[in-house]
Image (cartoon, rainbow, N blue to C red):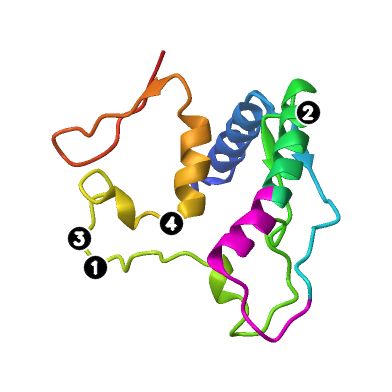
Amino acid sequence: MITSYFPKYVALFAICVLCVGALDTFIAAVYEHAVILPNRTETPVSKEEALLLMNKNIDVLENAVKLAARQGAHIIVTPEDGIYGWVFTRETIYPYLEDIPDPEVNWIPCTDPQRNGEKINELVSKELYHSHLPCDEYGRWKLHRT
């Protein structure tokens, strides 16, 4: 007698489909906005000017994210270049960028907080209002909301 694994695979597949169908759902929001762009220039702007422009776009995005969250969105997709735009040359983009350490670099944010970029520090500080952020024994931040 030849036995077939086909019925077992069909049953396993049906169980998997039923399990997936029973998962919780979520609401996603996709947001697009008219990015506030820098003036076209061949000369790089200062880091401060770049931060001012990015803050304007972040304010717009923040309002949209809050509105989407109030309407029940669990995940919000924002434009890829929605903070700074796309009208740059290789030289003029630099004031808008922040260093990301090489994975081989042993850098602990808790022991070297000045190494964070200004934009990252600002975004994190907004999220940390009414919070306590100590470093644990492994050099990682632990967030405690009050």
Question: Label 2: which residue?
Answer: 67
Question: Label 4: which residue?
Answer: 117
| Residue type at tag 2 | Leu
| Residue type at tag 4 | Gly
- Of the image marks 2 and 1, the number of the one nearer the N terminus: 2
Q: Secondary structure at mark 3?
A: loop
Q: Nearer the viewer, mark 4 or mark 2?
A: 4
The Cα atoms of the two marked residues, 4 and 2, are separated by: 28 Å
- Quadrant position of residue 146: top left
* Residue 49 magenta-highlighted: yes
Question: Label 3: which residue?
Answer: 106
Looking at the image, which residue sits at the far top? 146
| Residue type at tag 3 | Asn
Question: Label 1: which residue?
Answer: 104
The Cα atoms of the two marked residues, 2 and 1, are separated by: 40 Å
Q: Residue at x 67, y 29 (%)?
A: 74
Q: Are marks 2 and 3 in contact (CB under 8 Å)?
A: no
- Of the image marks 4 and 3, the number of the one nearer the N terminus: 3
